[in-house]
Amino acid sequence: MEKPFIPISQLIANQIRDMIFLEQRYQPGDKLPNEYELSSLLGVSRSSLREAIKLLAGQGILTIRRGSGTFVSSPKEGQRDWFAGAYLEDQKKLVKHWFEFRLILEPHNARLAAQNATKEEREEITRLARELAALVEEGKPFTKEDQAFHTAIATATQNSVITMTMPALEDAVRSAIATSTSIGKSQVSSQNAVKFHQAVADCIALGDAEGAEMAMRFHILHGLRDLDAE
Amino acid sequence: MEKPFIPISQLIANQIRDMIFLEQRYQPGDKLPNEYELSSLLGVSRSSLREAIKLLAGQGILTIRRGSGTFVSSPKEGQRDWFAGAYLEDQKKLVKHWFEFRLILEPHNARLAAQNATKEEREEITRLARELAALVEEGKPFTKEDQAFHTAIATATQNSVITMTMPALEDAVRSAIATSTSIGKSQVSSQNAVKFHQAVADCIALGDAEGAEMAMRFHILHGLRDLDAE
DNA sequence: ATGCTATAATTTGTATGACAACTTTGGTGC
DNA sequence: GCACCAAAGTTGTCATACAAATTATAGCAT
């Protein structure tokens, strides 16, 4: 059994994040205790605490003001990772919202991919669809490959915003609901997922924009339906 | 003339980021020099360098592996802030992609907002449209209020993923192209922006989903057209 | 009392040194 | 060739000291 190493700075960062999002002990705009207090409170050295703070600052969760203190960012200025606080929301709702969001975007992605993908990208997408089919056949987990498939399509749109956004969002949502619910990978739906993936891949390979869009829409609608069924 | 204080850790973080994105001296997967070398190379203490690294790690740009080294994340694993490196891409293209992305999403947002918005949210949206009209009337800048309008609509969809994503994305893209191009706020288009905003607001206020969607689509198409015209 | 100024207190920023913990590499013995 | 162990390389953590910026305070002049 391998246990992954987690640096104290990361642990402390998580702890502070939880104090903000879970306990709501500190709210946006609030000032954290100074570094000396906080470090002794959490039982670590000041250096480690500072590195933890830098991590959260990098994520936009904390704002540091020299000479005055460290504060919890307000959502506007601290853009980035506010999904990290999503556990305070109903997680099932988050997953549903995620699927509804994808229902808007991904059919368009499929369409654009069918129009703009390079030869290599079409082959890669086809390969990923096949790989996923093989995994399902053997009853193995296929979360990663599923994500890779959708990411490949996003990349094939040749739109940089889509290319950057989709994987980042997927990861963010996934990590937000990491421990609990699984994102629609029930045994029942896996067979259909394979079918739709293959359909989407075929349409993209042939440059059939209409078909790709429609297949993808069905695919996600299917996932959404499974979600409601639970 | 007040010059804002910038901590060395932040400066070093920027410097490293530039080495990755601008110079492309280190590419995804590459290993950075060890902390001792890098700190003496950049002329700072190891502690400051480490804090800079934590900042970039928090942004997902760097991945730290204890005992082996610090590496440049690949875009997949290093979710977050890869827009920060957008200056290496043609910025005009980024803006265009951003509009194309919005063209997909925002009409749906308007539709959902028309269906789901609370009474307060409808009033807020109407108010923002009026405020923007007033600003344009006086010839003042209205970037902030424009963003607020679209954000308010995103919030009114009652979909948490949309609510979280749109403002974050807007900020990310904006900061990526900060210094150079302005995001379509030419004098010519401002008048039309007012008109469309008002139309969208009216439709949302009345719960006219179809109308809201269509008005928003025209609004963004208009922006896209102005972009190509330049 | 009021308001300004200098000073002190608070707080984050930076540097240095030392050692611990983990990973990778290379050699050694079999 | 293989397994094991030692050593080198690298990040992790702690402790301490002082620098620099901001905020609060006290005192003085008006």
Image: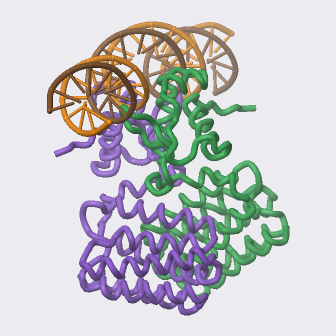
Chain colours: A green, B purple, C orange, D brown
Q: Would residue A121 be visible to someone looking at this image?
A: yes
Q: Which of the image's four quarters has the N terminus of chain B?
A: top left
Image point 73% across, 66% down: which residue? A133
Classify residue B156 as left or right of residue B80: right
Location of residue B203 with respect to D6 vertically, above or below: below
Classify residue A99 as left or right of residue A190: left
Image point 33% across, 51% down: which residue? B21
Image spot of residue A202 (x, y percent): 62, 79
Image spot of residue B98 (x, y percent): 41, 72
Image spot of residue B56 (x, y percent): 43, 42
Tell which of A110 and A133 is nearer to you.
A110
Image spot of residue A113 (x, y percent): 51, 76
Tell which of B44 and A88 is nearer to you.
A88
The answer to which quarter of the image holds residue B114 is bottom right
Image point 38% across, 47% down: which residue? B27
Tell which of D28 and A166 is nearer to you.
D28
Image point 41% across, 87% down: which residue? B196
Location of residue B165 with respect to B28 vertically, above or below: below
Count of all numbered marks drawn on residues in the image: 0
Location of residue B83 with respect to A69 vertically, above or below: below
Q: Which of the image's four quarters has the C terminus of chain B?
A: bottom left
